[in-house]
Amino acid sequence: MAADCGMFVDWSQMGDVSRDADPGKIEYKDLKELKQHARSGQWAKNHSQRSAVYRQLLKVLPCRTVTPDAAVYRDIVGSANSKRISSTPQLPEFVDGVAVPCYSLKPESVGSVHAVLSCIAGQFPDISYCPSLPAVTALLLHWSADEAQCFESVSRMLACNEPGRRLLDQTFLAYQSASMTFGDLVHKYCPAAHKLMVATATDVLEVYSDWQRWVLGDLPFSFAARVMDVYLVEGYKVLYRVALAILKFYRKQRSAATSSALTKQDSAAIRSDIQAFVQNIGKSVTPDKLLEKAFSIRLFSRKEITLLQLANEKSLQQKGITVKQKRQNVQLAVNADNFSSEIVSAKEIRDIWSWIPERFALCQPQLLFTTSTHGCSLNRFYSHCEGYEPTLMLIRTTDGEVCGAFLSTDWEERKRGGNKSSFFGTGECFVFRMKPEMERYEWVVIKHPELVNTAQSADDEQNCANNNDDAAQSLEEPTADASQLSPFLSTRHFNLNSTNTSMFMAGNADSIIIGGGEGNALYIDSELNHGRTERCLTFDNPPLCAESFQVALLEVWGFRDAMAS
């Protein structure tokens, strides 16, 4: 078996990896042990063991009834392997020009990857966009006895039909929404790295669109193999984790190397810089350190991420994005020629847009209300803002300070409380200040998920995974339904240990309030004239400007083409 699974490998590049060692343990009944072995690199030094474990993992993967196997490949292509007579097949169009990574393969083995991908294209005609497939195929070829076995392994990953689980994006819509979801995750879990991207890249989302390539393509083989171990065991979420860890390490390296003020660069330059960092990551980080960082990030559950992905897909479909096309540039969505605010500049609104959930950042800002035109009336504020979701509120004080809030929910929701003021909104709300320094303050639960009690109500049919699921949860996680709201998009499916942490927005005839619990992040009176700002538990923010202030100007912006969920 040891010889079977190494024929495509250039063993001179494999270091201390054993080719001939006994495979050892290859079957796992204890899922916790399997996960632990995958994360710790138990199979990293034993080529035949890793090959056998992969074969077992892919064998039990739930797939469509008709899934092409090794016999299909042999019928179509034969078993030429490295003795191929014909010229190397062209890569399918769906890989979007992405080259096959060498990954310590023999030079002639790259032709085998081309052959497998060519056959995949014929057997999976519905694949329209899958630039990660060359890297995945090249990795699996390492641990395959022949091309036919590699073809079967890739086919099973593509044909996986386990509810709530996917392994590979196969359409441009899925790939694009995954890039948007990654951007959302960077906002939440890598704020320092995101701040660096906003400060240095002209198009942040263009940079984030490379995230899958960092993991499957740019990482050196020893890193990519360790990622594949956990990827096959734990699924797609692992790719997000590793990409976030890469961005954290890049930010640390970039910050250490840059002492002067940061300047904007063309996005292509930043993309190339990150790619070079990832390709040479072994100079500063080990595979163990990368995975340790990846699994230290306290992501929400797979259900949460799946629902966020579905929301992003829906927004792209509303934009007509269903097939391969050029990525819409979110920053360019804010047309400086048409944008006119009396409070912030076009550059500042672009910076604010970089904080907004990706599905709304695709939209053009639309001025709904301004005190300079509509007057200082709370009733007129409501009449102009109702029916729009989400909205962005901007305030300039008479002292020249600027602050505001991103508000995820239609102000009409306030009417559900009758005459009594009650809070509503979701965990996507945030408050911010622009001057003297830009800073955003998000829902406190994002940074402190331990504040959430995940005990579900009796009528909740989902056995939702714990927010901090990665420490102890099993491999099986609940499937997500597009009709349900996730804890990140809504709090009403969570029983919080204090209502103070979910006081997002409220309004009545006397005032509007943003944030609650021991204070309000923003309070504006009925004449839209006087306001105050304090630390509140919902956002754990300091005062956003002078604690008691006079409003010089207030604007509310909507998101053109955004549709309320």
Image: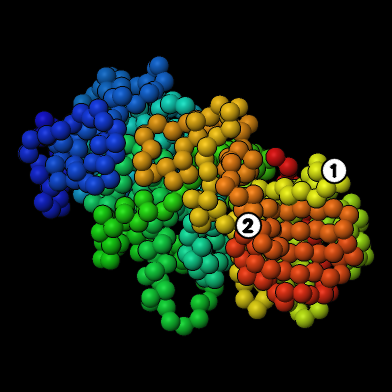
Report the residue at 85% width, 53% height from top.
Answer: 508
Q: Where does residue 516 sit, x and y in percent of width and height? A: 69, 58
Q: Where does residue 289 sit, x and y in percent of width and height? A: 28, 58
Q: Nearer the viewer, residue 286 or 338?
A: 286
The 10 Å Cα crowd at callout 1, few under 14, some 14 to 19, many 20 or more, is: few
Query: What residue would you read off at disc 2?
Result: 538
- Residue 450 appears left or right of 226: right
Report the residue at 29% width, 39% height from top.
Answer: 35
Report the residue at 41% width, 20% height from top.
Answer: 64
Q: Nearer the viewer, residue 409 or 233?
A: 409
Going by the numbered disc 1, the residue's amino acid type is Gly
- Residue 369 appears left or right of 224: right
Element under disc 2: loop
How far is mark 1 from mark 2, CA to CA? 23 Å
Query: What residue would you read off at disc 1?
Result: 418
Q: Quadrant of the C terminus?
A: top right
Element under disc 1: loop
Q: Are marks 1 and 2 in contact (CB under 8 Å)?
A: no
* Residue 186 visible in the picture: no
Quadrant of residue 67 within the rendered picture: top left
The label number, if any, that marks residue 271 in the structure image: none
Q: Where does residue 363 sit, x and y in percent of width and height? A: 70, 52
Q: Nearer the viewer, residue 286 or 326?
A: 286
Q: Nearer the viewer, residue 57 or 159?
A: 57
* Residue 524 visible in the picture: yes
- Which colour scheme appears in the figure? rainbow
- Residue 377 appears left or right of 56: right
Quadrant of residue 437 within the rendered picture: bottom right
Q: Where does residue 449 sit, x and y in percent of width and height? A: 50, 51
